[in-house]
Structure formats: structure tokens, C-alpha cells
Amino acid sequence: MKNPGKFNFLSFFIFPLILISCEFNTSIVDDILIQLDSDDNSVAYVSWSNTDLSTSSYLTLDLYNQDTLLSTIYLSSDVVSYTLSDLEHQIIYTIVVSAFDSDGNCLASINNTFFLPVTYYSDSWFLDEAYSVCAHAGGSIDGYTRTNCKEAFYNSYQDGYRFYECDIEMTDDDIPVLVHDWTLYRNMTGISEDTSITYELFLNTLLYDSYSPMTLEDLVEFMLAYPDVYVDLDLKTDDPLWVSYFVEYGENLSSSDDEFEALMDRLVIEFWDVEIYQAVSEAYDFKNYIFSNYYYLQSADELLEFCIIHNIPIVGPWYTYCTADYVSYFEAYNVKVYTYGGDANSYPDCTYLKENGVFAICSDYVTVDQWNSI
């Protein structure tokens, strides 16, 4: 995999600057640049300006992982570059170049931050155009949206969708089911606010008097029936109770250990808060994650930092964020941008999103063929 090449990170500091006991002096050291090797991104070429050597005797190059010093390299004062090797992914590196006089007094320092791009799995399914459009809440059905109903899932498959988004909620007796939110569900079913929604009531209540509700067990059956399907679980809370249910259903319904493992690998965990990620990742070692950005509206730097450290290859910002510059910022580190809402729900209104570099959308109406035709 080719990495994006040369970057100047002077304006981009994810972690606080490392405190050092000498002043910033651009007449001695200035402008650290980092260039990743195009064939081997465990190698980085570091260079800096060194225009006034009259007062400096030697230089040091310190390499940090956050605030932990990894190594110190001593260099003569006329050196203006160095090659770092054996770099690792999922680390935020900081380089500090300092100039010293003959008595060991620090004259000047400058630092910069860099990291290696996210690495993809060998079977990076999301790069396949078949998964470029995600059917929101199972896809629309007869003009209705956000139903998460059985009919929507199966009809969307016939319409060519292979990537689905759905939402998990817990019934009042703590059984996981597919529901966008309970307020919308009550509107779809006519169930009053003062009625407790138990699992039994959920199973026996049609949506809009026509459509079958879908349980987590139903989702497992659907995914086993169609082994080319991937499902984005849009999580709203950090309660991982649903994980044990999904594992139990998967183990009981799978015909072999290999089928069960393949099933779990086709789940894509979408989270909007790091606490959700931590809770779910502790409950099960899922392979696929999307860091979405529709509740807290984290900055691009915050999203990228988390994706780099946890090797997450997909971010999900709201569609209005998806300018060409925003998308290219993530693409430079092999992080793909997947979006939803607004123009992502309409063709050809979604065209500019594709042209800006968005690789996939979550939509109620846009078809896979429409998106891939752009």
C-alpha cells in the first residue's frame, strides 16, 4: 500500500507540546518536515532547517510516543536530516530537535507530530463498490423509512443492497430488538406512552399495521441466509448487553465455528462516543468499526487521532462536513469518509459528495447503481 508521502505537521498537534527547557529559535533549527517512505511506511525521513551554526555544538533528536521518550539520537550541528526506521502504526509520534552549546546548554528546540496511516485488512470489504451504499434502517419500504422491519431488509437485498444500517434498542424486559428509537416506534405502531413495551408485545405488533418487527435473532438469521451482507449497527448507548445476545444467537444458528466467525466479522460497529467503543470492544473483539460524528460533532483532528490509535478505517461525519478538503484530510491517512443525511438521501443531489471523495453513503433512497454511476 502506498502512503501519501510528504507532510508538514507544524500546524497540527494532537497532544500537548512536550515541555523542554530551551527557547524556540528559528535561526538555529526550524521547520521540521516528515516524509514517509512510499514503499515502506515504517520508515520516515526527517529534515529541518539549520541556518545558523555559529553557536551550536551538537544536536539531539528525541522521539516520543505521547509523553514517553522512545529514543535520543545525538547529531553533529551541521546535520539537517535523519532517517527513522521500524516505526509502528497506531502511535502518535512527536519529534523534538534541539541544539546545544559545547557546555551542554540547550539553545533552541522545535518539535513536530506525525503518525503512520491506518492499515487495512487484506479483506477490506468496504473498498468493494457493492458496499458503497448502505440501506438506512434496512432501507425504505413502500415510501416508509427507518422501520428496521423484515420486509425492508429482504426487499433491499433484492434491490441490490449488500450493506445495511440498523438500530438496536432494548425492550422494557431487556431483550435487544431493531428499533430506530422508541418515540418513532410508538408513532409507527400506535402504542401509547404509558404502555410498557415488552418483548412479547414487540413481537406481536406490526409497524404501520403492515410490516413485521425485526429482532436481533432475526438479524442473525438474515445475515446467515445472505453471507455477502455486512451490517452497520448504529449504537446509541454504551450498554453492551446486546453483544451477549448476538453471540448466543450466532453460535446457536451457525452451522460451524467458521460460519460463526464469518458472521461476527460482518458486523460493523458504528459509535459516536469513545465510551461506546470501549464498552463494546471489551465485550467482544469486533473487526470493523465506524466512528460517526453526529452527536458530539468532534473536530477532524479528534476523529483522526482516535482512528489512528485504534486503526479504524472509516469515519462518519454528517453530510454538510464533507467538503473536498475535509475528505482529503482523512484520505491522506487511509481513513475513508462515509456520510448520511440530507443530500445523501437523494439522487442526483448526492453527486457532489461522491465528487468530493466520499466513498460510501447511508441512504433511504439512493441505489447502489445510482451512486456507482457518478
Image (cartoon, helix red, strand yellow):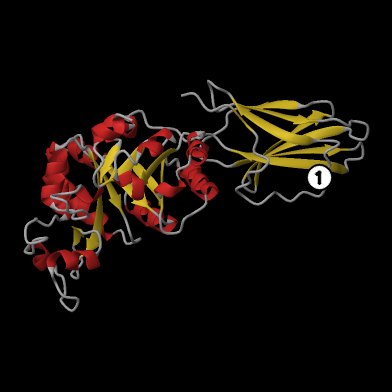
Residue 307, compared with residue 81, is above or below; it is below
Residue tagged 1: 24
Q: Residue furthest bottom?
A: 194
SS class of the residue under badge 1?
loop
Q: Position of residue 35 (x, y in %)?
A: 62, 28
Q: Position of residue 138 (x, y in %)?
A: 20, 48
Determine if residue 268 is in view: no
Determine if residue 336 is in view: yes
Kind of residue at disc 1: Phe
Quadrant location of residue 350?
top left
Q: Residue at x 70, y 49 (%)?
A: 18
Please indicate whether residue 215 sits to the left or right of residue 1 in the image.
left
Quadrant location of residue 65?
top right
Q: Residue at x 52, y 51 (%)?
A: 299
Please indicate whether residue 352 sits to the left or right of residue 244 in the image.
right
Q: Residue furthest front?
A: 348
